[in-house]
Amino acid sequence: MQDLTQLLLNGLSTGAVYALFALGYTLVFSVLGVINFAHGAVFTLGAYFTYFLIGGAAGANGLLAGLQLPFALPFWLALPLAGLGAAAVALLIERTAFAPLRQRNADPLLALITSLGAGVVLVNLIQLLVGAESYAIPTGALAGLPAAVRIGGAQVRSVQLLLLLVAAVLLTLLTLWIDGTRSGKGLRAVSEDPTTARLLGIPSDRMIQIAFGLSGFLAGIAGGLVGLSVSIAGPYFGIGYGLKGLGVLVLGGLGSVPGAVLGGLIIGLAEACVPADLSGYRDVVAYGFLFVVLLVRPQGLLGRVLPSKV
Amino acid sequence: MDALLIDASLLQQMLIGALLGISVYLPLRCGQLSLATPGFYAIGGTLAALLSTRVDALGGAEPVYPLSSVLLEMLLAAALAGGLAVGIGRVVLRLRGVYLAIATIALVEILRVTTLNQESLGGAVGIFGIPQPFLDPQGYALFTLIALALVCWLCDRLERQRLGRAMEAIRDDELAAACQGIDTDRTKLVAFVLSAVVAAITGVISAHFLNSWNARLGNFDASITTLAFVVFGGSRTWAGPVIGGLTLTALPELLRPIGDLRLIVFGLVILVGPLLLPQGLITPERLRLIRGLLHRGAKP
């Protein structure tokens, strides 16, 4: 029973990160129909922003060696600010890598390349500025919270609970926004058909920017939380999550918000169930799922079948 | 002499880049965005590494590894990758657009993680001491140049033939192509298999040249870099990926003097390239123009 609780919580908290990650892909995919390959870099940036905002110092290997902000914010304030910073970067990526292609009516597949280029620039910029070493966000950042609590006999790290809580709150807010507000409806209209939406007076470009901003915010928060829970393993650490996020995205159904959440939780739990002696194969789980789903149900678990147009 | 040696190994890497570019280009010629190239490249590389280090009959112990053994490895790698591609292609080519891209990324990752965890395939350490058929980079570069020239010649023939034109028709409009009586499924499968064969042969050459092989050589980064070759160079004729592969492989090396900034500049090139040249550097129209100029230049 104790082991099961542990397993479940481990799986759920990993899954929550995947879900946050995949939601960022989904938001952009639903309005543009392309995948933003720079998303992993935004996630990474969120983690670094959090690290610096709570008063961390840069290592010795970058241009900014030894740099430290003159103030140290508490984690609960640093995390949303890091999210906002990541959102700003995501908007910048939209301006440089996506908007120019849209204005020229270019092949949407080119956005895969341009966004990847933006990602390469960001990742190497991080490396240039703060070096390739790993950074650990001190667990003392959660002042006042015990390192672990006991639930049903299992030791659970508070970080994991925090991760689950934040993810749940964000997902609820996002769903409420999409379903219940005017701008949320606008987003759905644009994802249905951008041209018609524009004819009906919905500012498509504005909705696209909102989607990018939100996706950056979610990625930034996820990055900060993972940085706290594991550590920031260098500028490339978002890439692995980025690839997993693709698996989650397809599993749930491209462009489906509840699908991204369900996909994230399924893959997180499935990975937690891989026995320790096969842990090397853990990374195959997501891709194996992805492959099977693509073949059996290409629209994803909660996706819709679109009629093929002539 | 030192400078010449460095140049020959850079040239070798550029030629490998060009071959991989062609491998990505072939499915893209019929509008199929497959990112499986690094997977098949890894299959070729791993097969060559295993055969040449473990099968004594191939002549791994001799001071110079026999060229005939390399050719045999290439043949086997082509057969293995081609066979796999027929099986995988039948399944994944039912997917379209970005779904195909993601499925092939998943395929590459599954192959990579499996190789990483199988000690018999080299595991995390990799396979070392792969015997050398050539004693200097110049030999490799010449051999690869011949292979590239052969592949380019075949692609040029293909583009002028029924099959190549059918591929183009599918890219422009799959439904219309099917209505014209083109067997779209078969054409796409042929392109996918050819792509796998080119990638696997390239992997064999690369394994010998690099002297060691590990699972990391066929990863997601490679998927995207090779795709960038094609997008940058142009995806409508074989000359595009060749030029793209040559230049983009050379670029980070040529930028070495600017040190840490080089990968940032590389990223900017990939970011800005498609914006300035949505069709890529080389289009059939431009190629015809160049050919015309060369022709006119040769006459008087």
Image: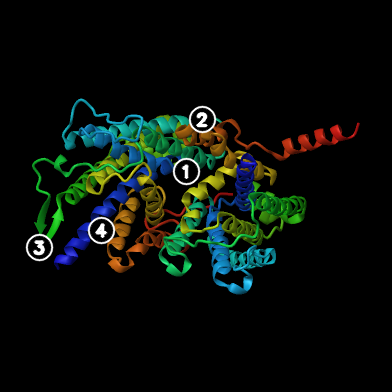
Q: Is residue A304 left or right of residue A6?
A: right
Q: Which residue is mark 1?
A: A34
| Lower position in the chain sequence, tag 1 or tag 3 | 1
Which mark identifies residue A11? 4
Mark 4 or 2, nearer chain start: 4
- Given contact means CB atoms under 8 Å apart, are the residues at marks 1 and 3 in contact? no
Give the number of the mark in front: 3 or 2: 3
Mark before the other along the chain sequence, 1 or 2: 1
The tag earlier along the polypeptide, 3 or 2, is: 2
Decide: few, some or many residues near mark 2? Use Cα within 10 Å; few <14, some 14-19, many ≥20: some
Which percent across, then down, holds residue B188? Answer: 63, 58
Work out which residue is located at the far right of the displayed protein and give it. B300
Give the Cα distance between marks 1 and 2. Answer: 14 Å
Q: Residue at x 55, y 32 (%)?
A: B275
User: Which circle, 1 or 3, is nearer the viewer?
Assistant: 3
Q: CA distance from mark 1 to mark 4?
A: 29 Å
